Image: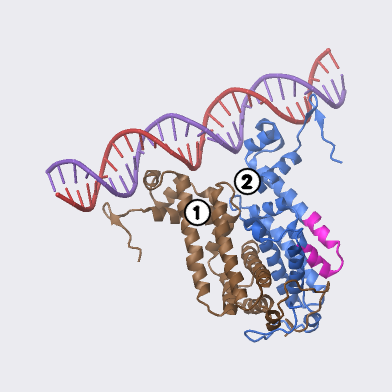
Chain colours: A blue, B brown, C purple, D red
Amino acid sequence: MMQRRMTKSQKVMLSANDWAEAALDAIGRRGVEGVAVEPIARELGVTKGSFYWHFPNREALLVAALQRWEARETDEVLDRVQQETDPRARVKRLITEVNTSKKASRIYSALSSATKPAFVRDYVERVSKRRLDFIIDSYAALGLSADNARRWALMTFSVFLGSLQIRRDLPEEWPNADEPAFAEYVRFLMVSLMPSELDAANNTPAPDVPEWPARSGGHGF
Amino acid sequence: MMQRRMTKSQKVMLSANDWAEAALDAIGRRGVEGVAVEPIARELGVTKGSFYWHFPNREALLVAALQRWEARETDEVLDRVQQETDPRARVKRLITEVNTSKKASRIYSALSSATKPAFVRDYVERVSKRRLDFIIDSYAALGLSADNARRWALMTFSVFLGSLQIRRDLPEEWPNADEPAFAEYVRFLMVSLMPSELDAANNTPAPDVPEWPARSGGHGF
DNA sequence: GCGTGTCAATACGCCAGCGTATGGAAAAGA
DNA sequence: TCTTTTCCATACGCTGGCGTATTGACACGC
C-alpha cells in the first residue's frame, strides 16, 4: 500500500524509488537531458544532498528510471492486453490503448529519440522488441504463417507507434475518444489490421499479387 | 552548385546557411539540446567568434535551422512524391520513402520529441499537417469521401511514421531494402493501405461493420 | 596606398549543473 | 544515555556552454 516513510518531525522521507519515479516524470516532460539532479531535487522539495545519499551519480538515476520503465511497460501494459484471450480482441485493445496515458507515450518517444547515454537505446530496443513479438504471437495465434504473422504485426505495430506520434504532433487531427469519429476509426482499423479467414487459410508466404490488386469486399460496407 | 566562398588565404568562409546546416546535422545526431554554439563551431573548425557575427544568439540559429528543415520537408520531399501522378503510386512511393534518408528521419523524431524551445512544436505541427493533408488529398483523388479519405490517410500516415520508428528502434526487425522480404512487405502494405474499387464506389461514411467482419479476398494470394 | 567592411580569434564574466566534503538532526539500538 | 545509523543541508570546486567586448587579418573600393 506504499506506506510513506514519515520521520524527522513528520517530513516525508524520500526513497530511491521516489527519485526514479521523479526522473521518469522528468523524462516525459523535459526529455532525457532534462533529468538533472538539482532541478528534480527542487521539485521534490529537497536538495541534492538527499540525492547523493541514494545514488552515486546521475547515470545511476537514469538506470533506475529505465529499469522501472522497462518493468512497467512489459509487466503492466502487456499484461493488460494479454488478459484478452481472443487474438482479435488483443489487437483492438492495442489500438484503443493509443488513447490512454499521454504521459507514458511521451516517455516512450523521449526515450526513443534519446542518444546521449548510449545504454538508453538498449532499454528501448528490448521494450520495443517485446511489444512486437507479442503482436507477432497474437497474429500467429490466428493461424497465420510465421512470415505472414510478422508482416501483419509489423503493420499493426507501425500503426500503433504512428498513432501515438500523430496524437502528439497533430492532436487536432486525432479523433477524440468521446466523439463518434473515434469509434468509427477504431472499427476501420480493426477491419484493416485483421486478416480475413481466407488469409489464414491461404497461407502463402510471398503473395504473388499484381501491381494494383483490386480487393473484393472490405471497407465499403 | 554551392560555390564555396574562399578568401582569407584560401580558408573556407562560413555563411549563415552553413551554420544552419550544421545545426540541423547536430539535431539529427545529438537532439535539439545538442545544438550548442561552441561544439558546432569546433566541428566547423572555427570558434564562436564566427558564430556571433552571423547570428545574434543560439535561438536564432535554431530558427534558421527549423526554417531550412521546413522548406526542405515540404518542397523537396513532397515534391518528390507529388511527381507521381497516380494516387496509388504516390502511396507506394511514400512507403518506400521510409527506407531513404536515415538522417532525415532522425531529425524528424528529434524535433518531434523536443520540448524546450516551445516554437519547435509549431514547425513540427506545420510539417506534419502538410504531410497528412497531402495523403488525404491523394486518397480523395481515388474517389473516396472526405471521411473515408481521412481515415485511410490517418492509417497510412501512421504506418509511415511508425515504420520510421521501428527502423530506428528495431533495425534488425526491419527488412533490408535489398532483401526480397522488403519488396514482399511493400506489396503487402500496398494491398492493405489501398482501398478497393468497391470502397471507392460504396462510400458510406460510417461503415456499419459487425464486430469481427470476415473479408473476402485480400492478402492470401 | 588607405579607409572601410567582412569574418574570425581571443579573452572575459556569467550561470547551471555535477560531484565531494562535511556537518547536523532525528531515529534506532545498545 | 550514548552511540550508531539514516537522511538531508550547506558550502565548495569544477566544467561546459552562453553572450560580450575587443582586437585582428584579409579583401575591396576608391
Q: Nearer the viewer, residue B38 or A196?
A: A196
Answer with left or right where residue B11 lies relative to residue B39. Answer: left
Identity, as a three-letter code, of the amino acid under mark 1 = Ala
Residue D22: x and y in percent read 31, 33
Decide: few, some or many residues near mark 1? Use Cα within 10 Å; few <14, some 14-19, many ≥20: many
Q: Which residues are magenta?
A: A74-95
Q: Are marks 2 and 1 on the same chain?
A: no
Q: Main secondary structure of the magenta part?
A: helix
Residue positioned 77% across, 61% down in the render: A96
Answer with left or right where residue B38 lies relative to residue B161. Answer: left
Compared to residue A161, the image places residue A68 above or below, namely above
Does residue A167 show up?
yes
Q: Residue A97 magenta-drawn? A: no
Residue D13: x and y in percent read 52, 28
- Foreground disc of the pair 2, 1: 2
Q: Which mark is residue A30?
A: 2
Q: Which residue is mark 1?
A: B26
Q: Residue A89 magenta-drawn? A: yes
Quarter of the figure that contains the C terminus of chain B:
bottom right
Residue A7: x and y in percent read 81, 27
Image quarter of residue B173: bottom right
Image quarter of residue A37: top right
Compared to residue D13, the image places residue A213 above or below, namely below
Q: Nearer the viewer, residue A102 or D14?
A: A102
Answer with left or right where residue B18 lies relative to residue A106. Answer: left
